[in-house]
Amino acid sequence: MPDTAENQAKEQPRRRQARGERRIAQLLEAAATVFCNTGYTAASTNAIAREAGVSPGTLYQFFPNKEAIAIELGDRLMHEMRDTYGEALAPIDPATTLEAAVGAAVDRFISFNCDHPVFFALMHGPDIPGRIAEEHDALHVTLLARIEELLSSLLPDASPADLSRTAHMCLGLYKAGLELVLGHEGAEQEAYIQELKNVLVRYLEPLTGGRAGREEASSRRTP
Amino acid sequence: MPDTAENQAKEQPRRRQARGERRIAQLLEAAATVFCNTGYTAASTNAIAREAGVSPGTLYQFFPNKEAIAIELGDRLMHEMRDTYGEALAPIDPATTLEAAVGAAVDRFISFNCDHPVFFALMHGPDIPGRIAEEHDALHVTLLARIEELLSSLLPDASPADLSRTAHMCLGLYKAGLELVLGHEGAEQEAYIQELKNVLVRYLEPLTGGRAGREEASSRRTP
Amino acid sequence: MPDTAENQAKEQPRRRQARGERRIAQLLEAAATVFCNTGYTAASTNAIAREAGVSPGTLYQFFPNKEAIAIELGDRLMHEMRDTYGEALAPIDPATTLEAAVGAAVDRFISFNCDHPVFFALMHGPDIPGRIAEEHDALHVTLLARIEELLSSLLPDASPADLSRTAHMCLGLYKAGLELVLGHEGAEQEAYIQELKNVLVRYLEPLTGGRAGREEASSRRTP
Amino acid sequence: MPDTAENQAKEQPRRRQARGERRIAQLLEAAATVFCNTGYTAASTNAIAREAGVSPGTLYQFFPNKEAIAIELGDRLMHEMRDTYGEALAPIDPATTLEAAVGAAVDRFISFNCDHPVFFALMHGPDIPGRIAEEHDALHVTLLARIEELLSSLLPDASPADLSRTAHMCLGLYKAGLELVLGHEGAEQEAYIQELKNVLVRYLEPLTGGRAGREEASSRRTP
DNA sequence: GATGAATGAGGATTCATTCAT
DNA sequence: TATGAATGAATCCTCATTCAT
């Protein structure tokens, strides 16, 4: 079974050499760096190429434009996230406290964000602030899907519209918290993480109708 | 050499200033429009000048650079906010429910944002996401100060650090909520406003130690 | 009547300074040179700016793109042509021979082309050869109109379709001849000019039905 | 290690050449397509390679540059033309009318152009309009030679210079006419074909000194 | 003050061509 | 041979900013 010109034709779309794959990785890494340093909007393809140590032409051999880089980067991040934290983002054990579940989720998300700072830069992506453009933003779509998935086990009675809205809220709150978390260090950072958890737990708790909240997790109570 | 029918030599310097003020207002209005349409980063000074109906040179006679425009715009917005809603943003009546206080504050903020859409654009301003650059951002600083002020009456026992952190959280949560609110319309928008209020109330309630929370603050109720 | 800010507003669209007009002329001249040297397609806006001794940005202050330069250049050429040769391109005197009329027209066209070599470059304009795109090509449209005008007095009985077709033919033949004329010098060039005239006269003569051909101009005859 | 069922060691060099020929044909076909779609100037070698389904590197293994592709394509077209229409393009029978001879020649040329649309694209080839660059353009040279050959039997008394000039004129007129023919369809196209024939016949008739023009050549007639 | 002209570096993107595998 | 990667100068065009008038 020699690899003659004939049998190559089958897999045309991805006849890529190992070097190419390496370059792509290298370019994505460079893009991550640049996105982090300057933000997505201000990042330039030339800067990415320069950071990667290649010529602009090389970049365009693998990506048709800046957005494609962001998309691919987002895709890889989502995959890495899935690989790292398992298919079901949080297969909530009914015995788990809301507090524990949210705490674990937030911890994982934050840890992931610390490992992959681009994630944050991409979340504040190409859109004009105020114009939410989820359709074009696979990252958001995927994240929202995962959060909805997670929430649906917590809020089994919620209508789809409510579920979607709650997911949007959670993601927004998380992003807001993350910004603060990343903006601080040490004990203060820890404090912000705790605050973020508090926010989410307290926001969600009344919605769960007692489920997963058997132990009355938050500080408040007065039956 | 009549210049107009108005007063001449005596008033000239003052008139010049008056005209300058008009120009500045004109430019800032134009900047607001452009920032809203394209976002701060993508907005170009030439576009602002064009929108204002003046030449680029004129713009630079009043502002040294793009950032200065944003800063001045922010300042004016803060003043307008103060003028509109009173010096103390919310001179909380001890008899008021937390829910009512937060609800009123959120309503006022949102109403202000709807009247001045730039506000939002500026909040997601020139800074690289992830790098919180409060020093350069008078808007944030002022907003935080006002929120702290507001909170200090709610949380009299909080340490300055806690107070500051809580204020940061509130502002972040508000911004996140606002983004969602502005991204929707009609009933859905109303629903997001309510969710935002819920988030803030539930987040703050446990911190108040009962003060202003006398009436059991959870989600909603009619006394 | 001081020129205050108020009375300026009227003539907004063309507030241009003398320097600007000069620059435009300079740029058009440079464009003419570059178009002649490299052809329209291969001409680059940067090359034009360089030839004009200005920066690319300056060029774009006056022209939005390369096509606009070509269009303006074509317009000016048409006007110059009209100014030089009179409104009616050839108010054919009934007493004139076809040969004389065509000869005069060709001579004038060629002389104009020699004075303004861009004319030729623009006629072989931006279009993909084979795709005739008259609609976008004001030069062609105007030339055709003038030729039709001229022909309508020669061929009063022709249908509009025939007239148009004949005009197209004449323009095509003229362009073909011009290419050869410009490609040669001295006596050979003169010979080509004569051939071009012969072609047109012999092509048109049978169409005129004797009108303007009273003297039986060409070499052939045999009644 | 079978390569195919065909003959192995002995035939290898020949097979390699055969494959090379196939590649070349493939590339030229692709080039023809691309030249037709975008014109010679705008055609990119990468696009040609892509259209041919090979890599850019492969293309450059057979052609040193873009121009070489055009030249080879022109050569092959000339050969194909010769193969199709016989060595002597029109071995004019003395008994034939000029009208018939020209009509047949034009019909054959046009039919050839319709079968091979590149032909036209190449004729308006790489040269800067106005600069006739025959040296680099084998197509033109060959065409001119054939036309001269054809004409020499019609105009036996013409000097070489006149012959060459007339050939140039004929080619130019033909190209001009072809452009119009290809730019129209149906009846209008037919009309343009007829006009082109008329032009050539009327142009050449007086030059033939009666030869082949015995039957009174003007516009059209049925004996 | 006001204008419009001018800048020139930098943006994304393309392309003929060469090179390593 | 064939491939896909690599190049880097060149493309068009934009923009914050400065300058002459």
Image (tube, coloured by chain):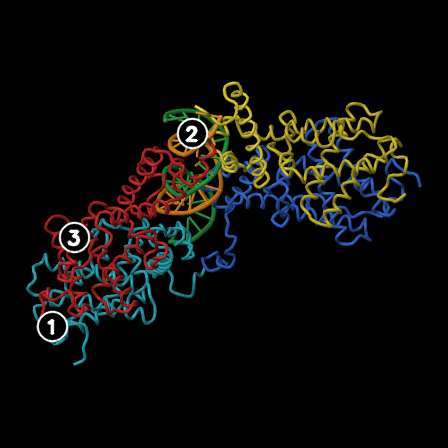
Chain colours: A blue, B yellow, C red, D cyan, E orange, F green
Marks 1 & 3 on one chain = no
- The span from disc 2 to disc 3 (Cα, nearest Å) is 52 Å
Dot 2 amino acid type: Pro
> Residue beneath label 3, please?
C107
How many residues crowd mark 1 within 10 Å: few (<14), some (14–19), many (20+)?
Answer: many
Residue A12 place in picture, x, y as percent: 50, 56
> Residue beneath label 1, please?
D213
Of helix, strand and loop, which one carries label 2? loop
**First-in-chain label (2 vs 3):** 2
Dot 1 amino acid type: Gly
Task: Verify CB contact (< 8 Å) between mark 2 and mark 3.
Answer: no
Residue C102 place in picture, x, y as percent: 17, 59
- The span from disc 1 to disc 3 (Cα, nearest Å) is 30 Å
Which quarter shows the C terminus of chain D? bottom left
Q: Which mark is residue C2?
A: 2
Chain letter of disc 3 in the image: C
Q: Nearer the viewer, residue A81 or A56?
A: A56
Q: Nearer the viewer, residue C80 or A87?
A: C80
Of helix, strand and loop, which one carries label 1? loop
Q: Nearer the viewer, residue D206 or A33?
A: D206
Asked if residue C7 lies left or right of residue B14, the reply is left
Dot 3 amino acid type: Asp
Chain letter of disc 2 in the image: C
Task: Verify CB contact (< 8 Å) between mark 2 and mark 1.
Answer: no
